[in-house]
Amino acid sequence: MTRKMTGAKMIVQALIDQGVDTVFGYPGGAVLPIYDEVFQQNSIKHILVRHEQGAVHAAEGYARSTGKPGVVLVTSGPGATNAVTGLTDALLDSIPLVVLTGQVPTFMIGSDAFQEADTVGITRPCTKHNWLVKETDKLSGVLHEAFHVATSGRPGPVLIDIPKDVQFATGTYEPKKPSVSHYQPPVKGDMQAITELVAAMETAKRPVFYTGGGVINSGPAASQLLRELVEATGFPITSTLMGLGSYPASGDKWLGMLGMHGLYQANMAMHDCDLMINIGARFDDRITGVVDLFSPKSTKAHIDIDPSSINKIIRVDIPIVGDVGHVLEDMLKVWKSRGRKTNSEAVAKWWKKIDEWRSIDCLKFEQKGKVIKPQYALARLEALTKKYDRYITTEVGQHQMWAAQYLGFEDPNRWMTSGGLGTMGYGFPASIGVQMAHPDALVINVAGEASWLMNMQEMGTAMQYNLPVKQFILNNERLGMVRQWQELLHGERYSQSWSESLPDFVKLAEAFGAKGILCSDPDDLDDAIMEMITYDGPVIFDCLVEKHENCFPMIPSGKAHNDMMLAGVDTQGVIDAKGSVLV
Amino acid sequence: MSALKLKKGSTSHSAYNLRANFSDVIERHTLAVLVENEPGVLARVIGLFSGRGYNIDSLTVAEVDHTGHRSRITIVTSGTPQVIEQIKAQLGRIVPVHEVHDLTVEGPSVERELAMFKVSGTGDKRVEALRLADIFRANVVDSTLESFVFEITGAPDKIDAFADLMRPLGLTDVARTGVAALPRGD
């Protein structure tokens, strides 16, 4: 039913019609009419963050853990520019977000007005699409279209910039209806290509599934189909950082994560395979290593909903454009109808080889002495939290890679991390968004002390909404990954990569009214972790760890998958001049 | 456990040579991009080219369907076959882009460009300029006692050839529209 209402009311009405229950935001002059409408309703819960970047990351955490789009409401100018990092993060990791920004009134646009910024101009390269709405009558159509664009095809962040006079003016509200947009990315894959892939699977001697975030974005059904396909074929499976949880870490076909800090067996399998089946991953440079030497002997199939991902970095033999869930369903159908064939003898031999690689046990470490190894801290965290309804977020750096290596994920949507952009400061606000969506779950942000400080103001948000998020900080008083690269590449000259003047994290927690726990002795660790888990409220866990631990395995810059560095290696002179220009 | 097969300084490759295995022949392609004529759509297209480091040799844009609010952007670009494929795929995922056509590979097409040349001079040079303009079927659209403005329409290489001839005869200013192109036949 069409109705007359103000633009501000339309915004709230459209969010309700779209099924939005939570909005993360921060008020300001250019969004006051919208906040006035937020005040006068009870359908949507508004979470007041302490910085707009926090709002966007919280919405990302909400979106990744639910599969629903995250919604953000911020003001013009600095409100919008503070959202830019989160938008870019969501774009690179394909996270659906709808971000609403206020704008100065239409008649003041272009006059360098107070808190004016060219928001659509600034955010054009860091959104999937954006709109500046200059007429109230067009507002509801754009709002509904925004949700459609954010969630269709390859998901991503969209932004709507709404001038203040458009919020005040009255117009006609059009309710949500089936999309009339021309933007309808196809979801079904080409059957001929799918049949070609199945035929390749039937004869493959050394196959590997290489899966990514696309499986998770496709929805829980895609993960189920993937599990079915892996079990039916008996092929080994590895995943990118973004795809962890789509196949269970406890599954016997699981090789662990691949890539720069991936597991030895995963990277070796990628290098030596004869059939690589990429499902919803994008041959990111953290995955491929040097592209000239990437998996030289394999036939490569690539399933991706975004045609621009195909042949962008690695030339593939069997491209399939479509939604992972739909393509997997068709693959299973075709494979079954052709008699469920695999080259089981050769695949058994391939598993033998993989088991040899596995036996190297590339993640082994020794906890000795009175200093906690970060790997040990995560191994204990894994052991003690595994049985809980658990969600993990991370910041960015060594702790993130260790978390990916030592924590096991049994289900999709349980692992929230900044993969593409590598945004320090992502994890804490993301944990808030996750906890909002799953109030009774155990939500842990695995952090480094330097990353965590980047958005520590969100302690206020966690306290205000009584969100019992656990901040598990591996404190090495270093920017650990920067330090590691300086050790490898810059002659151990540790320029600016230590954390000076750190706060007392226990007192900091107490200053916010939260609980702080300090742990420095490996013998105390289990009790301290249990204390963190059982405490009903936010906790900052300051875990003092070994300061100069390096994160291994590692594919050094400019090297191939079979050129990995394992723990205990001499770190000097490993990367040559050409490798050192890479990031 | 020490590093396996770790050869120090053995790698001469860089991840930035992303297309080393691909053909590195630079091709020139003319793309027709049909877009929703909404604010910012041209900025999206241009931003894509600058943001991802693609070349624009020529670009024209105008609304071609006033009731349907469709604009046609004609872009002449150059790159390796893989880069051209990427450009098309990247253009295709811009939300207000309806269609992307590669006129260079989708059968025969015609390309036209309009240019205006101001040629200043007197005496023999002025007469020669007028004579050459006639051969090239360029029209005189403005004249003073010491200058002509010629208008010429044609394929870009014809316009280049005309410019080369006019340069020694007193060419002072050039304005070119960039290429407009359509496929031939049905």
Image (cartoon, rainbow, N blue to C red):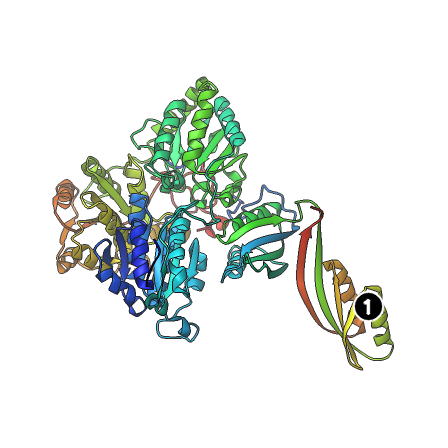
Label 1 packing within 10 angstroms: few (<14), some (14-19), many (20+): some
Residue located at (30% from left, 70% from top):
A29
Q: Specify the quadrant of the image occupied by residue A24.
A: bottom left
Q: What percent of the width, then of the height, locates residue A48?
A: 23, 59
User: Which residue corresponds to mark 1?
Assistant: B133
Q: What percent of the width, then of the height, locates residue A486?
A: 38, 53
In-front residue for pair A345/B39:
B39
Q: Specify the quadrant of the image occupied by residue A388.
A: top left
Is A305 drawn above or below residue A156 in the view shown? above
Is B35 drawn above or below residue A330 in the view shown? below
Q: What percent of the width, then of the height, locates residue A527?
A: 12, 41
Residue furthest toward the bottom? Answer: B145
Residue located at (28% from left, 46% from top):
A393
- Numbered-mark total: 1
Secondary element at tag 1: helix
Name the amino acid type tagged 1. Answer: Ala
Q: Chain of mark 1?
A: B
Relative to residue B20, is residue B174 drawn left or right? right
In-front residue for pair A528/A330:
A330
Q: Is residue B65 visible?
A: yes
In-front residue for pair A256/A559:
A256
Is A226 drawn above or below residue A216 in the view shown? above
Q: Is residue A86 visible?
A: no
Q: What percent of the width, then of the height, locates residue A85?
A: 36, 58
